[in-house]
Image (cartoon, rainbow, N blue to C red):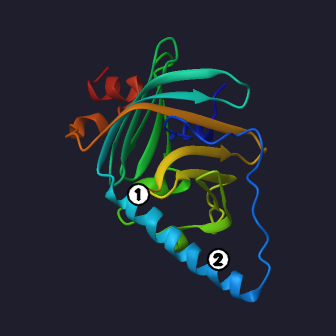
Amino acid sequence: MITLLATLALFQATDPAPASEPPVTEPVATAEAAAAVELDRERVLSGINDYLNSVDTLRSRFIQIAPDGSMAEGNLALARPGRLRLDYDDPNPLRIIADGTTVAVEDQALETVDRIPLRSTPLWWLLKPEIDIAEDAAIVSMEREFGFLYLTLRDPSEEMEGEIMFVFAEPSYELREWYVTDALGEITRVTLSGVQSGEALSPRLFVIPEPESRRDSRRGR
């Protein structure tokens, strides 16, 4: 069974950095070097914020790898702020929609819709109106290796469990990977392909459907 948190691990582009080993960081030998690293940290966070805030709309295919190794594919549509849609390919019956305040997981086979506040999901850090990583999240670590920047975040309010590691390509800070580690330590990874940005998207894509039982009650059945 794919958990809600697992389904929200969304972003990776082509040619990611190897994920089999953790990134290696160089030791800081002097106070002067430490200060340089801190200044570099500010520059990096500014670059990441600029990149994420520049994304208005995005379409792509995705491949999701769950903690048990199972794979799911589908189509993704994103419109900032606040809106996202994941349509899984058959036979997976799931559909995920964020409408600006709520994230809904629809099981089309069971005709159920489960909802969770957007603020309680990793999507919040990508879909909020104005992204400022240093203000929005507790930075667990920031490491670089082979031209990639690994940024691991945790929710300081603890409303969102687990950790999220973003992988950005330097120097453009394009988002290449997103790993979600849940409260049990299980990791989910998703790959994007055929990314198209700046395309006009219909607002109807991001309307959360009502369960069939509620639609029937409104019809007087």
Q: Secondary structure at mark 1?
A: helix
Position of residue 164 measured from the top left corner of the image (x, y, whole percent): 63, 52
Task: Residue at 47%, 56% (x, y): give it.
Answer: 173
The C terminus sits in image quarter: top left
Q: Earlier in the sequence, mark 2 or mark 1?
A: 2
Q: Amino acid at mark 2?
A: Val
Disc 2: CA contacts within 10 A as few (<14), some (14-19) or many (>=20): few
Mark 2 residue element:
helix
The residue wearing badge 2 is 37
The reply to whether residue 207 is visible in this rendering is: no
* Nearest the eye: 154 or 145: 145
The x, y position of residue 104, in whole percent, is 45, 39
Q: Nearer the viewer, residue 207 or 46?
A: 46
Q: Amino acid at mark 1?
A: Leu
Disc number placed over residue 60 in the picture, else none:
none
Question: Of the numbered discs in the image, which one, if any, rests on residue 52?
Answer: 1
**Residue 67 in picture, x, y percent from top left:** 72, 31
Camera-near label (2 vs 1) is 2
Task: Give the residue displayed 65% in from the left and 37% down from the top.
Answer: 188
Residue 203: give x, y in percent of width and height. Answer: 23, 40
- Distance of mark 2 from mark 1, alpha carbons? 22 Å
